[in-house]
Structures are given as structure tokens and as C-alpha cells.
Amino acid sequence: MAPSISPAPSEPQSFTPMDKEMLSIGGTCQYLTCDNYDFLPFRCESCRGRFCQDHRTEAGHKCAHAGEWAARKAQQQANRLPSSASQKPTALTATQCSHPQCKTFIDTLSSVGVACSTCNRKYCLKHRIPEDHECSKIIPVGARQGPGISQADKARSALGRLKLWGKEKQAAVLPKPKPSTAASRVVALNQLKRMAKGDEKIEPERRIYLYVEAEANTTTSKFPKGAFWYNKAWTVGRLLDDAARGLQVQNVNNRGGGEEARLRVFHVEGGRLLEFGERVEDVLAQGNTVVLLRGVGPVSNDA
């Protein structure tokens, strides 16, 4: 009675049928305690031995070279993967023009980025010339702050820029949205959820997803920005503590000291600093952006 042929497996296996080579003559299983003659034997891709259907797997014939076929396959797949340098830029890998009022994405197939050697930033074609992005007024990336600029001055300047950014985002959000705008917001929120990180113990229905940034002129962080989720029921103070850990920003708020070293949370869409005791769900919405900055003093949201 001819042995039945098992259907092709859905996942890669360590054995292959030898129907092309052994169809006419078959062969005896090479497992030590098995002498079954099989007209359609299997070849082990690790030890290259010939086995019947019962002993075709590595575990079935106690293969002396178990795992070699899997290692070879993994190496072949790794060699076929393109390097990150050769991948084409996409909307997910693109960056935004460094001009504060420009929303153009650069380093894409349709819009190249031009690096400015003076301020060490990248701009779109419209703002590539130093005069167009006011290069003389910008502190170059990586340059040390001069001794004449105090921490308080830097904090006030940073807060002013953030409030301007908030007004620009409000102007883009407040007008009556078009149908495509609502759809794009859903897509953006889904993208944020896919790349966000947070405490897995927080139940999904209690999560709020936010973009978090560390203001470069007033804080030092290992990661300048990121996407995170938090608990809606938390206070802003607890969100700040968790956000500082996520971006690895030094947080001395609970150690006392003056306002010069204290971190604050700025809500970009709301255009104001948040009080530590405010509840997250009362002041923030899904997909909002908050910025950590230091030394701006007590919360005073007067224009």
C-alpha cells in the first residue's frame, strides 16, 4: 500500500519531498530503528538524510544537525533585505522644514531638503537661502549659548515661540473642517497609536495618545521628542513625571528648589502652560502636542 502524501505545509519545514529524485525507485528510511521502504521519501535539509513520513522531521529522526536549515534560511533572508540607506523616503521617514512657519515635509521623493552650513538645519527649497530663514538670528545647532543669555531669558523666549506655535495650530484647527480633514485626523491618530509607547498596565479605553517634545533651549534630553500614551485620569504633574522619564529629561520638581530648575508642561493646541493639578482628560485631547520646558516661572498664561 503506497503511503499517503501529506499536503504542503503552510510554514517552512526542515524537510522536502524527494519525489523528483526518488520517484522511480523509492528508498529505505535511514532512521536507525526504522527499515520502512518509502516510494516517496523525504530529505532532511539539515543532515541531508532520507526518511519516511513518520521520521521526516528533525525531532522525528533526532537530527544531529538540527537547526542548520533554519539558520541558512534566516541568513538568506537577511541578505535579501535592503539596507536602510537604499530605501526610498516616505511620509513616515520624512522631516519637516526647519523654518518655524513652514509645514513642508522634506527629504521625500517630491521635495528635497537643503542643509544650511551656517545654522546646521535643513530647509525646503523655498527657505534654503540664509536670508529666507533669517539665518543670522538663529543659534546654530550644537553651538553653546553665550554667557550673556540667562536661563530666564531663554525660558521666556521659548515660551513665546511655543505660544506662537499654538496660535498657528489653533488657526489650522478652529475653522470648519472639510470632510477630508476629519479623515486625515483619524489617519494621523491611528499612526500615532501605532508608534506610541507607554505603560501596558493602562487599559486601552483609559489611554490618551500625545506627542511629547523637550524644548531644546531650556532642557537637555536624550530623546528630543516621542509619541506616548498616558492615563486620562492622571494629573498633569504625574504626566510630566512620566513624560520626563520617557524622554530622559532631568526632573527635579519633587526635590524643591526654585522655578529656574522646575519643569513645566506647555499645551501647544491650547496655547498655555498647564497647572500640575489639572486632570489630563479635562485639558488635553487625543493627538495633542505637549512640550516640556524649564525655568518659565509660575503658570501665568497672560498674552
Image (cartoon, helix red, strand yellow):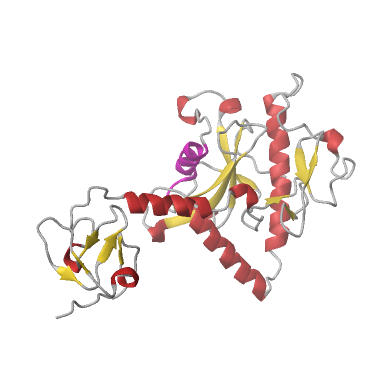
Tell me the residue at 59%/50% (across/down): 289
Residue 121's place in the image compared with 65, above or below, is above
Q: Which residues are magenta?
A: 234-247
Tell me the residue at 68%/73% (across/down): 178
Q: Quadrant of residue 273?
A: top right
Residue 93 placement (x, y as % from top left) = 63, 52
Q: Nearer the viewer, residue 166 or 9?
A: 9
- Please, which residue is most extreme toward the left here? 33
**Is residue 12 rendered to the left or right of residue 90?**
left
Residue 262 placement (x, y as % from top left) = 56, 30
Would you say residue 47 sits in the magenta stretch? no
**Is residue 290 rendered to the left or right of residue 152?**
left
Question: Principal SS element in the magenta part?
Answer: helix
Residue 267's place in the image compared with 263, above or below, is below
Q: Nearer the viewer, residue 185 or 118?
A: 118
Tell me the residue at 55%/34% (across/down): 222
- Please, which residue is most extreme toward the right here? 131
Tell me the residue at 48%/51% (across/down): 78
Quadrant the C terminus occupies: top right
Q: Nearer the viewer, residue 266 or 102?
A: 102
Residue 223 placement (x, y as % from top left) = 56, 38
Q: Is residue 243 visible?
A: yes
Q: Is residue 268 visible?
A: no
Residue 90's place in the image compared with 177, above or below, is above
- Please, which residue is most extreme toward the front here? 25
Would you say residue 240 sits in the magenta stretch? yes
Quadrant the N terminus occupies: bottom left
- Please, which residue is most extreme toward the bottom here? 1
